[in-house]
Image (spheres, rainbow, N blue to C red):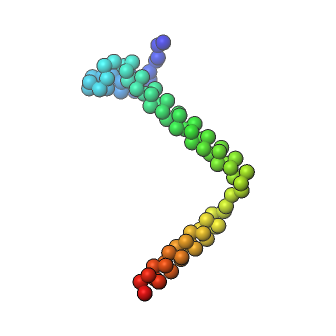
Amino acid sequence: MNVKLSPDFEKLAEECVAEGRFDAIDDVVDAALHLFQDQEMRRRAFIQSLKDAEEESEREGYVTLEEVMADMDAIIAAAEASEAVQAD
């Protein structure tokens, strides 16, 4: 397979080879594609997690930000009250 690189990418690949980081331009392209593959797998996993969360909220319901904040305020107040009792 032949791949045509833009002049900027070709220059970058040539610099990487000249610096000794890679043996050949093919190796640079291979490394770039491995990075892209990893990024694509993470993107797909993230999208799937969003879909899963949406399905879960449809099945089990969801809480609003206000409800979460109220719960957090209650937890903090209880912890502060417990600390105050222990200090006495």
Is residue 61 shown above or below 25? below
Q: Position of residue 13 (x, y in %)?
A: 36, 24
Residue at 71% from the left image edge and 56% from the top image edge: 61
Q: Position of residue 62 (x, y in %)?
A: 68, 58
Please tell me which residue lies in front, 61 or 6: 61
Numbered label tally? 0
Q: Residue furthest right?
A: 59
Vertical placement of residue 85 versus 19, above or below: below
> Does residue 10 appear to the left or right of 20 in the view shown?
right
Q: Nearer the viewer, residue 45 or 22?
A: 45
Task: Give coordinates of residue 26: x percent, y percent.
Answer: 39, 18
Quadrant of the frame with the C terminus: bottom left
Q: Nearer the viewer, residue 78 or 7?
A: 78
Identified at 38% across, 23% down, the residue is: 28
Q: Is residue 7 visible?
A: no
Residue at 49 percent of width and 35 percent of height: 39
Q: Is residue 84 above or below residue 20?
A: below
Q: Position of residue 64 (x, y in %)?
A: 66, 62
Along the line of sight, the residue nearer the viewer: 47 or 82: 82
Q: For the view shown, which residue lies furthest in the bottom direction?
A: 88
User: Quick check: can you spot residue 68?
Assistant: yes
Left or right of residue 51: residue 29 = left
Would you say 5 lies left or right of 50 here? left
Q: Residue at x 53, y 34 (%)?
A: 41
Q: Would residue 8 be found to the left or right of residue 21 on screen? A: right
- Residue at the farthest left position: 19
